[in-house]
Image: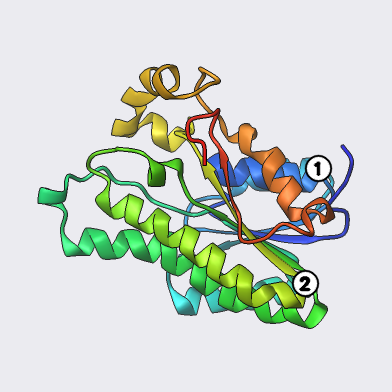
């Protein structure tokens, strides 16, 4: 490993499993200490970070709740003193046809997928501005560009992630902070394996991707590491489709 993140402190939401766990593990191998916010048990991720020789802080935190985010940020600052890299990874993706979609479903999707990115950024951007260095990486999705039914709420939230990334990049660029997003394809994780999305694993890559295999979390860690490092110091406001060639824009 090149240790491109040596000495950095990375905050990752939804780091208990799946994409968040993969990014936490890769960042640790690249030299970063890790702080995880999740409502699920993070024991497995903690073990992986420690095995890489790095420190880890895990806090049970609903990233859509202002008070919980503030308490989490206080613990991060007390433990590590700062946040250099923020990965807004947490998200939900319930399949609900629009005719059956309730306003409560819509609101909860936006709370988790959009409000969490706002709240985490509000908590950690001030410190990044003081130090004139920071990286914010947010997860969106290639569904923004695709025809997928029963996903009106989810696609709308992912569009908001892209808009937030572009707008925040404009404000934070003068302070040495970059803001970018990653748009994966359908990623095989423990959660998606047990969801209705699992039926798409075989057909989707063959139909739409140039690389005809199902995406796994490790497919995203190289891009995340690049965006978190000084190698991407002049890239901001961008959404990178890391999806096996599903979309081209």
Please give the residue where the numbered disc 2 appears in the rendered image: 176
For residue 80, side relative to residue 144 (left or right): right
User: Residue 29 got which mark?
Assistant: 1
Q: Is residue 82 above or below residue 87?
A: below
- Earlier along the polypeptide chain: callout 2 or callout 1? 1
Callout 2 environment at 10 Å: few (<14), some (14 to 19), or many (20+)? some
Quarter of the image where the N terminus is located: top right
x%, y% of residue 202? Answer: 40, 17
What residue lies at 27% left-to-right and 46% top-to-bottom? 151
Q: Is residue 193 above or below residue 132?
A: above
Q: How is the image coloured?
A: rainbow
Callout 1 environment at 10 Å: few (<14), some (14 to 19), or many (20+)? many
Disc 2 secondary structure class: loop
Q: Nearer the viewer, mark 2 or mark 1?
A: 2
x%, y% of residue 86? Answer: 65, 62
Q: Can residue 167 be seen in this snapshot? A: yes
């Amino acid at each position: 490993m090149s240790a491109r993140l040596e000495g950095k402190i990375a905050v990752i939401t939804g780091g208990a499993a799946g994409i968040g766990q993969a990014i936490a593990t890769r960042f640790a191998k690249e030299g970063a200490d890790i702080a995880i916010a999740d409502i699920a048990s993070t024991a497995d991720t903690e073990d992986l970070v420690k095995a890489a020789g790095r420190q880890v802080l895990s806090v049970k935190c609903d990233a859509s709740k202002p008070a919980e985010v503030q308490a989490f940020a206080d613990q991060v600052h007390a433990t590590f003193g700062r946040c250099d890299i923020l990965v807004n990874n947490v998200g939900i993706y319930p399949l609900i046809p629009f005719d059956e979609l309730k306003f409560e479903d819509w609101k909860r999707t936006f709370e988790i997928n959009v409000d969490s990115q706002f709240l985490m950024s509000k908590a950690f951007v001030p410190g990044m501005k003081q130090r004139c260095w920071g990286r914010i990486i947010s997860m969106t999705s290639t569904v923004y560009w695709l025809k997928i039914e029963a996903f009106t709420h989810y696609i709308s939230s992912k569009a908001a992630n892209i808009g937030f990334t572009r707008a925040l990049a404009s404000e934070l660029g003068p302070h040495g902070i970059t803001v970018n997003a990653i748009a994966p394809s359908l990623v095989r994780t423990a959660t998606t394996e047990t969801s209705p999305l699992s039926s798409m694993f075989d057909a989707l890559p063959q139909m739409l991707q140039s690389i005809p295999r199902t995406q796994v979390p490790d497919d995203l860690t190289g891009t995340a590491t690049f965006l978190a490092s000084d190698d991407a110091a002049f890239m901001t406001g961008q959404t990178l489709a890391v999806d096996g060639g599903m979309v081209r824009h």
